[in-house]
């Protein structure tokens, strides 16, 4: 390192240390601004994932229905293959049949229980979800009607051909019956409480026929545009299925997400503006204190460019240090917000570290422009005369 550079470094260090209180204020302002910038930008880009996870608690956001009649599990598997596997939260196919419980007709829904748990996490179940053959879940209204509770055994009947029974007594076909153990009672406050729920395999055993599907619910973690593209591709690739979005979920998610991102962006801009004002005010005070020093240096032959470089370097050093500290604290700030709002950890984005540092340096540099201009305008003759 040359003597000139050593001297410049010593001057820079001495200048910062002599005015520690003001420089600490400027550094804190930059650090806080960088912390909020880094934290909010992290939240801004992580919000779609967090909001998607939260909205999945409100149920399915895509439905498969038949273009004509019914469709099969093979059709569902083919359609689901058009969606990236990592985006699929749950798939719940449904088949509906009228059954009889104590000679009273009720509606039964056969489904994949594991998939239904994922697509309908808001369902409140007293007891357990069915997990084995011969287990059934009943709605609250069914439980009240027949005074059933988890652990009870009930018989479900299904008539293969009621028309044959009515036409000729000799052709009467006895009901298929199957005993089920009630494992849970479903309470939703909606029409779901009027159904009994069993597995697709139990429904096939009860009806003694291959079970086709009436509808399939999907919970997919994706943006509204991605969901639309998936639905269009599925409807094209699988002619027997019509894929459509549950608009009350997808539109609500899009609306909330856009407003939240706009709010985060607005707060970030306001914080950066306040940081610039604080840094500019501090640097103006520093330059006002050093007017005599500046005047003396100019009288001894210091150029305006040299003075500009010195003060700008001081500001940029503060900006770099504040950016480094802010990028570290910003992650913890974002993680704290995420844990308190979404109850999940934030995704670390390494690229935000250099972006935060560069942004802090730029903001600090812009903040120093007006104060440095006043330093350049110092008249040595007037300052040294004490005016």
Image (spheres, helix red, strand yellow):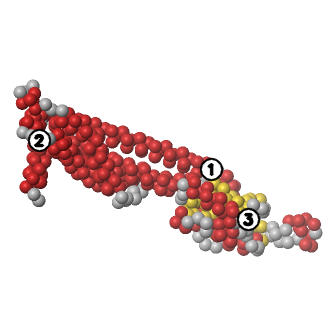
Q: Secondary structure at mark 3?
A: loop
Which callout, 3 or 1, points at the residue further toward the start of the chain? 3
Q: Are marks 2 and 3 in contact (CB under 8 Å)?
A: no
- Of residue 11 and residue 385, the one placed in the foreground of this image is 385
Query: Mark 2 = which residue?
Result: 302
Name the spot of residue 365 as percent of width and height, x first: 26, 44
According to the picture, the residue beneath numbered tag 1 turns out to be 247
Q: CA distance from mark 2 to mark 3?
A: 83 Å
Q: Is residue 35 left or right of residue 98?
A: left
The mark nearer the N terminus, 2 or 1, is 1
Image mark for residue 28: none
In this rendering, the answer to whether 59 lies above or below 159 is above
Query: At 10% across and 27% down in the image, what residue appears?
Result: 382
Question: Is residue 200 visible to the viewer in this orientation of the structure?
Answer: no
- Pinpoint residue 21: horizontal percent, then vertical percent: 15, 41
Answer few, some or many: residues within 10 Å of disc 3's Cα (few below 14, many 20 plus, some between 14 and 19): many
Residue 144: horizontal and vertical position, in percent? 66, 54
Q: Residue at x 70, y 60 (%)?
A: 242
Which circle, 2 or 3, is nearer the viewer? 2
């Amino acid at each position: 390192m040359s003597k000139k550079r050593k001297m410049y470094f010593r001057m820079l260090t001495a200048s910062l240390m002599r005015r520690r209180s003001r420089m600490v204020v400027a550094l804190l302002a930059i650090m806080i601004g960088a912390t909020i910038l880094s934290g909010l930008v992290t939240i801004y880009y992580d919000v779609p994932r967090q909001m998607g996870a939260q909205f999945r608690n409100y149920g399915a956001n895509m439905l498969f229905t038949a273009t004509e009649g019914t469709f099969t599990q093979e059709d569902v598997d083919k359609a689901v293959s058009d969606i990236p596997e990592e985006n699929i939260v749950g798939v719940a196919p449904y088949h509906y049949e009228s059954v009889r419980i104590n000679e009273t007709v009720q509606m039964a829904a056969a489904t994949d229980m594991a998939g239904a748990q994922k697509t309908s996490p808001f369902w409140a179940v007293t007891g357990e979800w069915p997990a084995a053959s011969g287990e059934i879940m009943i709605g609250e209204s069914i439980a009240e009607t027949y005074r059933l509770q988890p652990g009870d055994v009930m018989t479900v009947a299904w008539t293969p051909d009621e028309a044959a029974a009515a036409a000729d007594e000799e052709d009467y076909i006895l009901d298929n019956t199957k005993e089920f153990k009630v494992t849970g009672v479903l309470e939703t406050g909606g029409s779901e409480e009027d159904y009994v729920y069993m597995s697709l395999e139990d429904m096939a055993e009860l009806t003694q026929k291959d079970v086709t599907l009436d509808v399939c619910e999907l919970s997919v973690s994706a943006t509204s545009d991605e969901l639309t593209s998936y639905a269009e591709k599925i409807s094209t690739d699988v002619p027997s299925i019509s894929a459509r979005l549950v608009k009350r979920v997808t539109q609500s998610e899009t609306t909330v997400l856009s407003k939240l991102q706009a709010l985060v962006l607005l707060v970030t801009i306001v914080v950066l503006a306040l940081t610039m004002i604080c840094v500019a005010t501090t640097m103006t005070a520093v330059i006002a204190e050093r007017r005599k020093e500046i005047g003396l240096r100019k009288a001894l032959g210091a150029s305006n460019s040299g003075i500009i470089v010195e003060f700008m370097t001081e500001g940029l050093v503060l900006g770099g240090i504040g950016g480094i500290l802010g990028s570290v604290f910003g992650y913890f700030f974002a993680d704290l917000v995420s844990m308190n709002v979404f109850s999940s950890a934030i995704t670390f984005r390494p690229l935000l570290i250099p972006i935060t540092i560069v942004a802090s340096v730029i903001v600090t540099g812009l903040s120093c422009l007006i104060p440095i201009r006043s330093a350049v305008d110092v008249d040595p003759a007037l300052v040294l005369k004490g005016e």
